[in-house]
């Protein structure tokens, strides 16, 4: 009986000692994991210049730069709350609009502008984060 009591006492003491050390090591491991995730996100942002994967609406494709600017200005005048971008993808000038995180957001905007820009469509793109 004494041997069982002593072994039980020893097990409880060992458990208490290990359980007191364990939270500190768990906190340290959690802290290291959080730091690794922060570093990983920072390196990803450096590699992508802070841009996110998202969607834009392509409203114009054409070789005429003046026509592309005309379409961009027409869009900006009508929808001043949505940003527009002019890119050159040889041999065409491309006008894309919006910075949408999800395809659903892009689709809602597409339905809104499709009356004036019937040939517009959704494309995957790197987008700028929204400034608050």
Image (cartoon, helix red, strand yellow):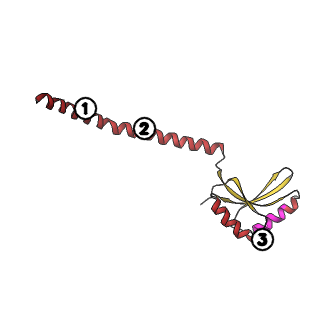
- For residue 29, the mark is 2
Residue at 70% from the left image edge and 53% from the top image edge: 125
User: x%, y% of residue 35?
Assistant: 49, 41
Residue at 53% from the left image edge and 43% from the top image edge: 38
Indicate whether 20 appears above or below 114. Answer: above
Q: Quadrant of residue 79?
A: bottom right
Q: Earlier in the sequence, mark 2 or mark 3?
A: 2
Residue at 71% from the left image edge and 65% from the top image edge: 110
- For residue 120, the mark is none
Q: Are marks 2 and 1 in contact (CB under 8 Å)?
A: no
Residue designated by label 3: 116
> Magenta residues, as a range?
68-76
User: Taking 45 as reference, is 63 left or right?
Assistant: right
Gap in Å between the C-alphas at discs 3 and 1?
75 Å
User: Taking 113 as reference, is 17 left or right?
Assistant: left
Gap in Å between the C-alphas at discs 2 and 1?
22 Å
Q: Find numbered disc 3 in the image and state the secondary structure of the residue it sits on.
A: loop
Q: Quadrant of residue 26?
A: top left
Q: Are marks 2 and 3 in contact (CB under 8 Å)?
A: no
- The quadrant of the picture occupied by the N terminus is top left
Residue designated by label 1: 14
Q: Residues within 10 Å of mark 2 (few under 14, many from 20)?
A: few
**Is residue 21 highlighted in magenta?**
no
Q: Nearer the viewer, mark 2 or mark 3?
A: 3
């Amino acid at each position: 009986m004494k041997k069982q009591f002593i072994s039980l006492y020893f097990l409880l003491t060992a458990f208490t000692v290990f359980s007191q050390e364990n939270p500190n090591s768990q906190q340290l491991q959690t802290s290291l994991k959080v730091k690794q995730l922060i570093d990983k996100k920072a390196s990803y942002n450096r590699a992508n210049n802070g841009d996110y994967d998202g969607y834009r609406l392509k409203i114009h494709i054409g070789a005429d730069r003046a026509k592309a600017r005309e379409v961009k200005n027409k869009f900006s005048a009508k929808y001043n709350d949505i940003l527009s971008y002019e890119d050159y993808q040889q041999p065409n000038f491309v006008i894309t609009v919006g910075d949408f995180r999800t395809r659903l957001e892009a689709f809602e905007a597409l339905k809104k502008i499709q009356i004036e820009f019937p040939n517009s469509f959704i494309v995957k793109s790197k987008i700028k984060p929204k400034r608050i």
